Image (cartoon, coloured by chain):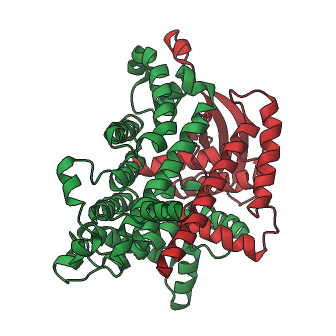
Chain colours: A red, B green
Amino acid sequence: MRQKYVYVAWFCLHFLLIVSFSCRETLRLVAEGPTILPSWSKNFSQKAEGVLSIALGQRLAASNPVRQALATYLHLAGIEAGYGYFAPNVPGSYRLVFELHYPDGRVEYELPSVSSAAAGLRIAGLLDTIGRTAYDVLREHLVRTLALSIWREHPDAKTVRAVLGSIKLPTASEFEHGKRESYEFLYAYDFSLQNEPAKPKDR
Amino acid sequence: MQRSREQLREFLFPAGTDNWLTVLRVGLGFQVTFYSISLRNDWNYLLSGTARNLAEALLSLDSHFVPRLGWLVALAAPVDLRQETVLSFIWICLLAAGCCLLVGLACRLSAILAWLFHLCAAKSGGFVSYGVDNFMTIGLFYLMLSPLPDRYSLDWRLRELRPKDPQFLGFWRRVLQLHLCAIYFFSGLTKCLGSGWWNGSSVWRALIRPPFNVIDPEILVRWKCLFPVAGIFICLFEITYPFFIWNDKTRKIWLICICGMHLGIGLMMGMYLFALIMIILNVAAFGPGLIRAEGKRISLQPQEAVS
């Protein structure tokens, strides 16, 4: 009987965490918008998300043992994220193209490539992270990682330019009228063989 | 008060067989095996180098205690094992754990190893992880804690091993069921907040967005009048899942529709692993007992089921 109480207590805590983190994710999505809710809901959601984050210990110092223990459990159980996939709307995607410049003036173009469709889905996720992150340093590091792997396959290349663009998808009606997906330039990074730091170009 | 406590106890600890656990074990065995095979050529590429170090550094900001590949690589460093060798060894272990789960050999150990190695890969490959990893962690976490082995495993048949706490079979199934209800409710709720799911543009965008553009948009656009209907159905089926999946009369409809939706996602968007894990979790949680003949069998008490 006592064992059952332990199970019930664990379940209550576990389910409370699932619901709380899902609520927080939902509030974050509303706060970031756009949603069909009125504009005042953004402010409300922002405040509510803040309160919930405090309640869940997410505003404690990163080294705080309570926060560390909670984060560890959430990761172990796979409940650290909400479930708002493709919500509230389906975001656009990104494309990264590498320009390989050879000493003889030749230029070749390469895309990040993997050998299976399953790994391709993962690379697409990585490109989304690169495109969406607000941290320039992180973006540059991730682009450099991909550029290095391309370089290993083309060791003769003198410089590599990585060009990141966002893919603009047409609506169904626009597609019917002949409009196709287009690309908007976002960032470019130049890497040279001498391992010089990347030189980001203006957006 | 006493009565509601009794009702809660009955709800959380229902009697039942281990059929659901068999579905979960075999299903996750397939999932882990397919996951490993699908990444065999790209495993080292995706999980080594700067991207992994960055992902692990960011993970450390969250928690220092979440298992990661870096720990295993560091453990092997004193014996001069290269990173590539360690990663390949982990891949083999994961594949072996998946195969063992499939046939039910060393169920508990296989479940723990599959959970641990998959978790390490998912966390260290944070930038290349997506929803499927989350759901695999959830499924393997519950499988690892459930009373294994089940009646159809080799552990039961050949080694004559029996679960230690069979009275908790119903509890773990309930936890999985309630977790799925929360997943679909919040997934549906967040979709309902976007106008794209009501006017069908999100369905169109999801289907033509690289790398999910498996079907030629020229073919898709001919069916554009169905996109709003599909979008609204997805929202409604997801958000109402927790309310209709418990009722005997509506459970079959909701389960078939949800599994059909995931099958559609798998086939039309190329997300086979994602579709498979969601179908496995749904069928394990709500499938056993759905057919009448099966319903008669689950009247067995757990003690009888394991005797």
Residue A90, located in which quarter of the rendered image? top right
Visible residue check, residue A5:
yes
User: Up-down: is A35 above or below B70?
Assistant: above
Visible residue check, residue A111:
no
Quarter of the image where the C terminus of chain A is located: top right
The image shows residue A194 at horizontal and vertical percentages of 71, 60
User: Up-down: is B73 above or below A97?
Assistant: below
In the picture, measured across the screen, residue B24 lies left or right of residue B44, that is: left
In the picture, measured across the screen, residue B166 lies left or right of residue B58, that is: left
Residue lying at the far front in this picture: please name it. Answer: B2
The image shows residue A187 at horizontal and vertical percentages of 73, 40
Mark count: 0
x 75%, y 38%: residue:
A32
The image shows residue B294 at horizontal and vertical percentages of 20, 54
x 57%, y 62%: residue:
B1
Q: Which is more toward the observer, B165 or B87?
A: B165
In the picture, measured across the screen, residue B111 lies left or right of residue B197, that is: left
The image shows residue B226 at horizontal and vertical percentages of 43, 18
Residue lying at the far top in this picture: please name it. Answer: A177
Residue A107, located in which quarter of the rendered image? top right
x 39%, y 36%: residue:
B261
